[in-house]
Image (tube, rainbow, N blue to C red):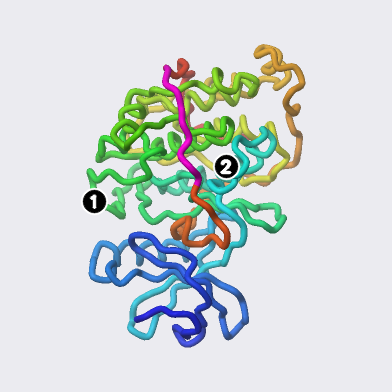
Amino acid sequence: MELIANTVVAGRFRLVRKLGEGGMGVVWSAIDERTTDAVALKFLRGEALAESDAIRRFQREAKTALRLSHPNIIRVREVVDLEDGTPAMLMDLLEGQSLAARLAHEGALTVPEFARIFLQILSAVGSAHAAGVVHRDLKPDNVFLLSEGSEHDVRVLDFGIAKFRAPEGEGATTALTGTGAMLGTPFYMAPEQVFGERDLDHRADVWALGVIMYECLSGRRPFAGDNFGQVFKAITRGELTPLSVIASRLPRDLIDVCARMLEVERDKRISDLRVVFEIVRRYTDVDALVFSAPTLPAGSSRDDFAEALAPTLADTGAALARSGQGSAFPAPVTTTRWPYLAGAAVLLALGGTALVVSQQDPPPRAAASTAVSTPAPEPSPVAIP
């Protein structure tokens, strides 16, 4: 059906304006004439309706979204049937800007502001991993910052190319996309994504979050080039300037954990985002949901979690003193945290740019090339008390 302003669809939603579109879907703002609420509706584009894979992906995204939820992932309220029988997703209408737009406007974030935003991202993605879901397209465009002041003002978007992995001992679920395909956004793709590895797991998300962390703290992407071929070459070789060189006054623990997230060999990369969460939470008083260990394929091995985590939980003052930073950054924040969330669920949401009311694409950020630092031991699935 043709989508134009003032059209009423599904017998109750009056379309207002198109917010954005991607390869598979298009999103409109609308008014629910039953409740007068302003909402967002995601439709399949006409071309996608002719592709069975796109329809299955849309249906699966919607079905999972209705069953699962997290305060830092956009909420899908329901799936409605249009007059022609095709489905549409009814979602909250978000007002604010993407993290990409924020970085394009302001450059590097302060440590407290970075920690406030990033802790909520970690909560959302870590909970997804605990539920066996790999996002595969994490980037600043898919992180939305609400304009209204609220306790949870960050939303992770676009689980459209997510991959599902069943808990150990169960049969693996089918991926939403074909195996061996190179999916994601080039600047944020892990080396195994660049090579189109078939056994992609949550460590690809850890890499992408490392890129986002680097970008937030330095104001530029770690990997750059004149074309995607050069970007991919830099990624697979680990050619980047360490944060310790371009932002030497950052807290040493943040510098070190970012380097561990950007290990080219995924077996050396941080496997459990709870390690990162425990470091970042020291610089903010935000109450974010903690999460359980991620699921891994049966037979996967892990190092001892306590051994990996202990050095990162050292006194912040001592860490700053070792790096010669004095009192340039905030002392550890002590606050009452939300209860431990075992097996937290995740909500599969729509594409990032589609939901913004005011958003800009950031310009490319240049980056020099050198080697990353030596990794520390990888974490294991022991619960944090």
Is residue 60 shown above or below 336?
below
In the image: residue 51, left or right of residue 298? left
Task: Name which residue lies at 24% across and 46% down.
Answer: 181
Which of the image's four quarters has the C terminus?
top right
| Nearest the eye: 373 or 290 | 373
Is residue 322 shown above or below 110?
above
Task: Name which residue lies at 69% across and 36% down.
Answer: 112
Query: Is residue 365 shown in magenta?
Result: yes
Which secondary structure dominates the residues rendered in magenta? loop
Q: Are marks 1 and 2 in contact (CB under 8 Å)?
A: no
Is label 1 or label 2 in front?
2
Is residue 314 shown above or below 300?
above
Crowding at mark 1 (Cα within 10 Å: few <14, some 14-19, many 20+) = few
Percent position of residue 273, x then y: 51, 35
Query: Is residue 339 shown in magenta?
Result: no
Q: Which residues are magenta?
A: 362-370
| Nearest the eye: 179 or 357 | 357
Which of the image's four quarters has the N terminus?
bottom left
Q: CA gap, disc 1 to disc 2?
A: 33 Å
Quarter of the view holding residue 71: bottom right
Residue kind at label 1, given as amino acid type: Gly
| Nearest the eye: 8 or 231 | 231
Crowding at mark 2 (Cα within 10 Å: few <14, some 14-19, many 20+) = many
Kindly identify which residue carries mark 2: 103
Kindly identify which residue carries mark 1: 178
Q: Earlier in the sequence, mark 1 or mark 2?
A: 2
Task: Name which residue lies at 66% across and 41% down.
Answer: 116
Q: Given the current orientation, which residue lies at the most extreme bottom position?
A: 11
